[in-house]
Structures are given as structure tokens and as C-alpha cells.
Amino acid sequence: MTSLLAIANADAGTSSDEIVGEVVTVLRDDFDVELVTTSRPDDLERAIAQHPDVDAVLVLGGDGSLHAVVAALHHAGRLSDVTVGLVPLGTGNDFAATLGLPEEPLRAAEVLTTGRTKTIDLILDDKDGVVINAAHIGIGAEAAAAARPWKKMLGPIGYAIGAIITGLRGLTSDGARLTITVDGKTLPRKEPVIQVAVGNGRFVGGGAPLLPQADPSDGQLDVSVSYTESPRRRIAYAFSVRRGDHHRRDDVVYLRGTEVTVRGDALRCTSDGELTKASTSHVWRLKAGALTMYIP
């Protein structure tokens, strides 16, 4: 019988002992399941180290939980040894949406027994940090920072509040001066930039299709660069992101590649929802087919 380590995040947005217990019960007929609950990175690292021979790892949580588990497996050199499953119990569940996973936890758990497996690309930054869904700098990262106080109380609505706060602040911003290079070629446009996004997943912030054409298994990362010209156009850009058609705008450059370098003004970055300190340099490269996941 396939051995399965189920990892529940005690802090995930919709997680509860009852739901986790029901998921584990569903899987016990097909897997030899061991459940661990973690709340800190060292808990997670310890759990993975104590189970060196498992065939599969199931993440019971959201984008942040998936990010943490994949990062721990990567740093332990275990990504090629296990198949990763996901039952979306977070606030946004953006990567689960890209994979087409059911929102209902028990149906998502059944994917491990009725679905298939597929290789998934991984993005690594210049500090060997992982990005499984998306990373972005500029107004999106600032919106994520502004949403933090609201996210716990209001769930996905917190993302919208963060976006509104950031949008109002951004009306007087001049944007950032950046040099952006994709696969060794520097983008020629020099206007101030309001956002750079790279990723495997289509959605961020609880469903906004920031990278609407992304395919996590195509061996390329999607890149979206948004330039700014006026407050009016920034507002229009924000609405077009919610519709998922911003990549067709004349002030957006949308392309694909395997390595992206951004240098210039210091900006914070959010990687799978984890916010970093401001930096003048951001580098991402693709590691194609780095992990295998259960999908419908």
C-alpha cells in the first residue's frame, strides 16, 4: 500500500480538525496514512525528516502551506522521491484553482485515488527560495502587505481591501525605475513600472488572474510587466486584472521565458503570498518538471 504523509497546517484559513479527520478517513482505504499537524517551519522540517521513505505527501492547507511543504522537500532533496497532493484549505487557494482541484475538501482528497499524476515546474529565486504559484513586485506586493490585517478576519475579501488601499496610495506614486531581463534579453521599454509578475499559476489574491495564460507544466514561466502612464490608466489596469484581460493592454508586456532578472528601485516581493523585504535585485529561474503532483 502506498505510504502517505498528510501534513495539516493548523493556521490554514478554512482548516479544522473535523475536516482534516474526514479527509484522512477517505484516504485510509487506499493509502497507509500518517497525519501530522504543523504550525512552524521547524515542525515541518522535522516531520519530513522523520518520514524518509514515504511515497507521497499530502498538503492540507492553502498556497502558503503548499509553498512551505514544497520548499522543505526541495531543501531536503526529496522532491523527486515523492508525489505531492493538495487539499485546498487556505484563504485563497489560487494554485489549486490553476490545477482544477475541487474546492470541496473530500472531493479534492478523492483526486489522489481517482485522478492522475503530472509533472509540475518549479521556480527558484537567487536565494534558492521556491515559488510554486507566483511571485510579484510592485502594487501587487504592496496590496498583499495591506491585506494582512484584514485577511484573517475577512478571508478573501481581505485581498480586495488591500488592493483598494494600495490603489488609493498608488495614485500619487511615480512607479519604479527597473531594468528587466528575460532569458538574457532586456526589455526595451523604460517607463516607470507598477508591477512585475512571474509564475506557474494563473491566479493570485484569492482568484485574480494575474497570469491568465500560465501553464504549470509547459517548461516556461509566464512574465507580466505593467507600465504606468496616469492615475486613470492605473485604475483601468486594476479592473482589467480582475477580468483577466490586462495582458492585451498596450501598457502591459506579457511573455514567457525560463529566467527573469529585475534590477533597480528597491521593491518588496510576495512569493506564494510570503512577503519579503525590499530589494534592488530579484532573480527567478525555472526548474522544469521538478515535482510530481496529483491532479484531476
Image: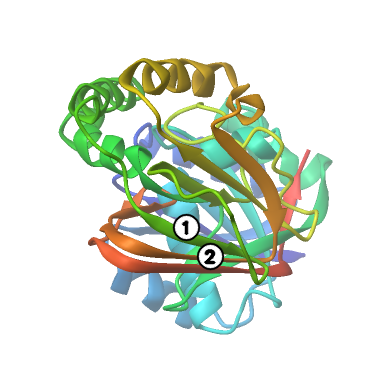
Q: Residue at x 75, y 44 (%)?
A: 295
The foreground one among 3 and 119 is: 119
Question: Which secondary structure lies at badge 2?
Answer: helix
Residue indicated by mark 2: 70
- Disc 2 and disc 1 in contact, CB within 8 angstroms: yes
Horizontal relation, residue 290 to residue 278: left or right:
right
Whether residue 212 is visible:
yes
The foreground one among 90 and 190 is: 190
Residue indicated by mark 1: 67
Q: Residue at x 38, y 37 (%)?
A: 15
Coordinates of residue 155 in the picture (x, y in percent) = 31, 25
In this picture, is 232 found above or below 153?
Answer: above
For disc 2, the neighbor class at 10 Å (few under 14, some 14 to 19, many from 20) is many
Q: Residue at x 41, y 50 (%)?
A: 64
For disc 1, the neighbor class at 10 Å (few under 14, some 14 to 19, many from 20) is many
Q: Quarter of the image containing the N terminus?
A: bottom right
Horizontal relation, residue 142 to residue 270: left or right:
left
Q: Residue at x 50, y 67 (%)?
A: 130
Horizontal relation, residue 169 to residue 15: left or right:
left
In this picture, is 8 found above or below 163?
Answer: below
